[in-house]
Amino acid sequence: MEKQQHSLIIFIFISTYLISSTHPLMVIPRLSPIPEWETILYNNNFASSSLSSDDVKTFYYNQTLDHFNYRPQSYQTFQQRYLMNFKYWGGANSSAPIFAYLGAEAPIDGSPEGLGFITDNAASFNALLLYIEHRYYGKSIPFGSREEALKNASTIGYFNSAQAIADYAELIIHIKNTYSHKSPVIVFGGSYGGMLASWFRLKYPHVAIGALASSAPILYFDDITPHDGYFSIVTRDFREASETCYQTILKSWSAIERVASQPNGLSILSNKFNTC
């Protein structure tokens, strides 16, 4: 049993390594502090093909480049993409809420299909659904192209979370003025997007009456939370469940390192476990 657990752990490790090492898409810097899969800037043609719902409509807003300074270039604008779903909305005279999903470190294309929680609750509240794309992702690229937007420190300097939530505030106010200024707004987000949602509620309480921040690591920064805090909790969980399981996992790390450090070690493990 212990040997099987050991083999399974090595298999998962090698599979993860091989998948991550062959990622074919363009990398863009992360704003999230969580070391998850690398964030990618999708090809626009690839991303747009994922939209399939007839209920979701695509719009663009002429967004301000710099919300906080007064230099001449601050007044430049770019096209920020957002999606809307009016299927469940009670209408302008109903004071029905607006559920605004704050986009994170990815194109917004797949969000309507992947955010079942928002859609599932929209009917109960007669809510208008709004999905806003984060600047520098998908089709919301300043300076006209990815190459120009990521060209140097001057252009990439506008790529930060403070500017992003200011974008959201400006666009949400635009939506309220256009459709229903009486409608209260609830913002939603997960992981880095959850951080944005919580910060949005703190920074712009006059725009959103509430925020739902799912799995938002708002304290996951240097000198605030121990860097190994998550791993310590997971280790404790395994150890409480089974001391044998804990010891097996602990021993596996040295075994993985030993095999992987050998000549063609990763290939040996890949062949052994028949990874794809």
Image (cartoon, helix red, strand yellow):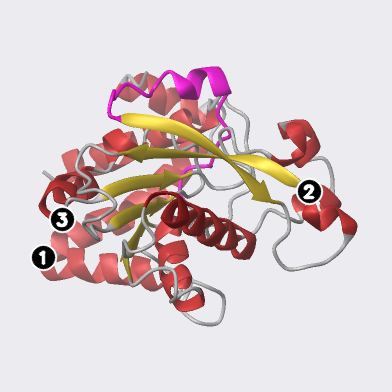
Q: Tell me if residue 214 can be seen.
A: no
Disc 2 crowd rating (10 Å Cα; few below 14, some 14-19, many 20+) is some
> What secondary structure predominates along the stretch shown in magenta?
loop
* Placement of the N terminus among the 4 image quadrants: top left
- Judged left or right of residue 102, residue 148 is right
As helix, strand or loop, the secondary structure at mark 3 comes to: helix
Looking at the image, tell me whether mark 2 or mark 1 is earlier in sequence order.
2
Q: Secondary structure at mark 1?
A: helix
Q: Which mark is residue 143?
A: none
Q: CA distance from mark 3 to mark 1?
A: 42 Å
Q: Earlier in the sequence, mark 3 or mark 1?
A: 3
Q: Amino acid at mark 2?
A: Gln
Q: Residue at x 60, y 39 (%)?
A: 140
- Label 1, on which residue? 241
* Residue, disc 2: 76
132 or 89, which is in the foreground? Answer: 89
Instruction: Write down the region rendered in magenta.
Output: 36-55
| Measured Cα–Cα span from mark 2 to mark 1 | 57 Å
The residue pinned by badge 3 equals: 125
At x 29%, y 52%, the residue is 92
Mark 3 or 1, which is nearer the eye? 3
Pick whichever of labels 3 and 2 is earlier in the sequence: 2
Q: Position of residue 74 (x, y in %)?
A: 80, 57
Rendered view: 230 above or below 75 = below
- Magenta residue check for 39: yes
**In which quadrant of the rendered view does residue 180 lie?**
bottom left
Q: Residues within 10 Å of mark 1 (few under 14, many from 20)?
A: few
